[in-house]
Image (cartoon, helix red, strand yellow):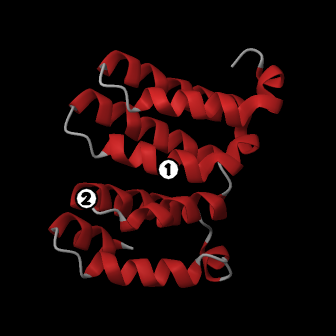
Amino acid sequence: LHHGQLLEGHVHSVLRSVLKAVDNLRSAVAKNAILTISDMWLGMGRVMDPELNLVAPVLLKRFADLTGFLSEVAEACIDKVISNASDGRCLGAFLASASNKLPTVRAKAAAVVLRCIQKFSPGKLSSSRELDKLLHTLAQFCQDRQSETRNYGRQI
């Protein structure tokens, strides 16, 4: 991101426009929108944290997509978000998206929650504000219909 300081005051409005493009039926447009989110997170870092609650459900939906390359691009973007966002907010945003109606999205959410937890240091997770929600969601993962979700629940 070459001119991130120009975006700082307009991050929310720019991101809302980009998120609309992620759901575009044209796969090239959706892919470029996901890459834009990824670049924004790399370039602006924790300035983007307040937008996690908007971004997480959209990226999880694309991560669970059957279109292979869109799923791969969304997974790479999620990895960049996890590595550049604050631990607690990242975990909270993806936990909030874990109760999706679609079983494939829940499975991918469980995988992402596992990645978020792996980023935490051992003592930091037990003092996290998200611990109660994590335990509740973990129980849901372990009782899910889909075996992939249950498997990630056991790993957590």
Distance, label 1 to label 2, CA atoms, is 15 Å
**16, above or below 79, in the image:** above
- Looking at the rendered structure, the secondary structure element under dot 1 is helix
Q: Please give the name of the residue rendered at 37% of the width and 59% of the height, measured from the top-left corner.
A: 109
Decide: few, some or many residues near mark 2? Use Cα within 10 Å; few <14, some 14-19, many ≥20.
Answer: few
Q: Please give the name of the residue rendered at 58% of the width and 54% of the height, measured from the top-left corner.
A: 53
Q: Please give the name of the residue rendered at 65% of the width and 49% of the height, measured from the top-left corner.
A: 85
Q: Position of residue 24 (x, y in %)?
A: 36, 26
Q: Please give the name of the residue rendered at 21% of the width and 32% of the height, measured from the top-left corner.
A: 67
Q: Which mark is residue 140?
A: none
Q: Position of residue 3 (x, y in %)?
A: 77, 16
Residue 14 horizontal side relative to residue 115, left or right: right
- Looking at the rendered structure, the secondary structure element under dot 2 is loop
Viewer-closest of 125 and 41: 41
Q: Position of residue 92 (x, y in %)?
A: 57, 65
Looking at the rendered structure, the number of numbered marks drawn on it comes to 2
Q: Position of residue 59 (x, y in %)?
A: 43, 43
Viewer-closest of 139 and 117: 139
The C terminus lies in which quarter of the figure?
bottom left
**Residue carrying label 1:** 56
**46, above or below 139, in the image:** above
Residue 144 horizontal side relative to residue 16, left or right: left
Decide: few, some or many residues near mark 1? Use Cα within 10 Å; few <14, some 14-19, many ≥20.
Answer: many
Q: Quadrant of residue 151?
A: bottom left
Question: Contact, CB < 8 Å: mark 1 with mark 2?
Answer: no
Amino acid type for the residue under numbered disc 1: Ala
> Foreground mark, 1 or 2?
2
**94, above or below 83, in the image:** below
The N terminus lies in which quarter of the figure?
top right
Q: Which mark is residue 102?
A: 2
Viewer-closest of 117 and 149: 149
Amino acid type for the residue under numbered disc 2: Leu
